[in-house]
Image (tube, rainbow, N blue to C red):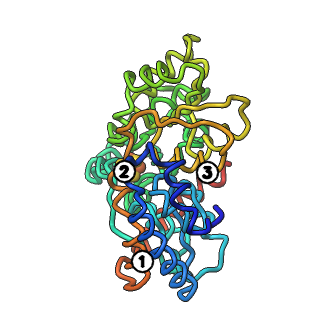
């Protein structure tokens, strides 16, 4: 994303994010942000750091980043660059994924150590017990997992390719049990999108993301009431995903205008669709990115509650402190990284 001249931040933030974060972008706070952003840019240049930000980060972090995107997309982006340092604005498992892919050739720092409710829902002992019970079973883990879980997995998947990976794993391992973890909503939507999968052979872990779980049926109905002509861009992690999928399959109005998409898929869809307005069914940081990248169209947050407090632990001031102190460096134990990379590579090989 292009860097804005700083004197335009006040207008941009209030136009594109004023309703998302009411009262946040006062003149005084925006002036502080501008000063901090200047120092961040200087230090990043001196330290040859590449700053990247996840879609759910605050607008100011998206603006200072060289790249904004989803977790795997950002890791693959930094892998193509030659910077000796990355400052990753996201949650901890994302920093681990970047470090796993980058290895020793690049140091990875984060502004804070934010956790993630979806990652926290994984019990390693339970995963190991499943593997002991089904020694020839196949484990597919969503990329939103810690490095240790990835290392215990056969395949990694993203919200973009979960159905494709599930289909491939079922075809390559006929008759074998599959464990899909940790997100039960993504798992159940993915099964319904697969042609080769016998659902009775798939165990769905019962984890979920508390932010997306809150996006339930009533949030959708209310959003459609407010914006009856809009298309709905819905992330498959949402609590309403199964309900929404069954309405889509029944051809119910207004659900014919619902699309199950990853965050990158939302951006591509918005660019290509002829629709002028969209309800965005994911964390509201994505609404800001869509408004900035597709300014000629209208985007509405599905619910004012769609905010991830883990993602919002990162601030511009903390990014500056991180650049000054090198305090929060991400490390992944080499044997864990090797095994995790194997599962990531297996996913990449089937795309
Ligand atoms: S929105 Fe927050 S809690 Fe949910 S998966 Fe992303 S980082 Fe984790």
Q: How many discs appear?
A: 3
Tell whether label 2 touches label 3 (CB within 8 Å): no
Dot 2: element: loop
Q: Is mark 1 within 8 Å of ligand 1?
A: no
Dot 1: element: helix
Dot 3: element: helix
> In front here: 167 or 50?
50
Label 2: which residue? 23
Closest to the camera, between mark 3 and mark 2, is 2
Label 1: which residue? 320
Q: Residue at x 58, y 62 (%)?
A: 8
> In front here: 231 or 297?
297
Marks 1/3: CA–CA distance: 24 Å
Q: Residue furthest bottom?
A: 46
Q: Residue at x 60, y 36 (%)?
A: 298
Q: Where's residue 292, x and y in %?
A: 61, 51
Tag 1 or tag 2, which sits nearer the N-term? 2
Q: Is residue 4 left or right of residue 112?
A: right
Label 3: which residue? 292
Closest to the camera, between mark 2 and mark 1, is 2
Q: Where's residue 50, x and y in %?
A: 57, 75
Residue 214, relative to residue 60: is it above or below? Answer: above
Q: Where's residue 131, x and y in %?
A: 36, 48
Q: Callout 1 environment at 10 Å: few (<14), some (14 to 19), or many (20+)?
A: many
Q: Is residue 182 left or right of residue 337?
A: left
Residue 140, relative to residue 310: is it above or below? Answer: above
The quadrant in which residue 296 appears is top right
Marks 3/2: CA–CA distance: 20 Å
Residue 90, relative to residue 196: is it above or below? Answer: below
Residue 173 showing in the rendered view: no
The quadrant in which residue 219 appears is top left
């Amino acid at each position: 994303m292009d860097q804005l001249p700083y004197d335009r931040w006040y207008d941009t933030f209030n136009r594109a994010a004023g309703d998302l974060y009411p009262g946040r972008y006062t003149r005084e706070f925006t002036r502080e942000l501008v000063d901090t952003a200047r120092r961040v840019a200087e230090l990043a240049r001196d330290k040859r750091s590449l700053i990247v930000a996840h879609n759910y980060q605050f607008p100011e972090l998206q603006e200072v980043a060289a790249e904004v995107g989803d977790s795997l997309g950002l890791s693959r982006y930094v892998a193509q660059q030659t910077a000796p340092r990355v400052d990753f604005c996201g949650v901890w498992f994302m920093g681990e994924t970047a470090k796993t892919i980058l290895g020793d050739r690049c140091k990875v720092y984060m502004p804070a150590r934010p956790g993630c409710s979806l990652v926290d829902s994984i019990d390693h002992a339970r995963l190991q017990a499943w593997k002991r019970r089904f020694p020839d079973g196949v484990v597919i883990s969503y990329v939103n997992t810690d490095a240790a879980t990835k290392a215990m997995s056969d395949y990694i998947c993203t919200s973009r390719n979960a159905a494709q990976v599930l289909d491939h794993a079922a075809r390559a391992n006929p008759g074998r049990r599959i464990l899909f973890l940790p997100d039960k909503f993504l798992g159940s939507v993915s099964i319904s999108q697969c042609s080769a999968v016998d659902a009775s052979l798939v165990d769905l872990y019962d984890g979920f993301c508390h932010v997306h779980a809150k996006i339930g049926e009533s949030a959708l109905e209310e959003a459609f009431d407010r914006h009856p002509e809009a298309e709905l861009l819905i992330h498959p992690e949402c609590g309403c995903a199964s309900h929404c999928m069954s309405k889509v399959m029944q051809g119910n109005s207004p659900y014919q205008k619902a699309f199950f998409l990853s965050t990158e898929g939302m951006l591509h869809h918005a660019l290509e669709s002829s629709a002028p307005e969209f309800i965005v069914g994911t964390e509201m940081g994505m609404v800001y990115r869509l408004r900035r990248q597709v300014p000629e169209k209208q985007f509405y947050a599905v619910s004012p509650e769609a905010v991830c407090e883990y993602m919002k632990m990162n601030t511009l001031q903390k990014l500056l402190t991180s650049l000054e102190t090198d305090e929060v460096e991400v490390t992944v134990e080499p044997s864990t990284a090797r095994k995790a990379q194997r599962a990531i590579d297996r996913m990449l090989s089937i795309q």
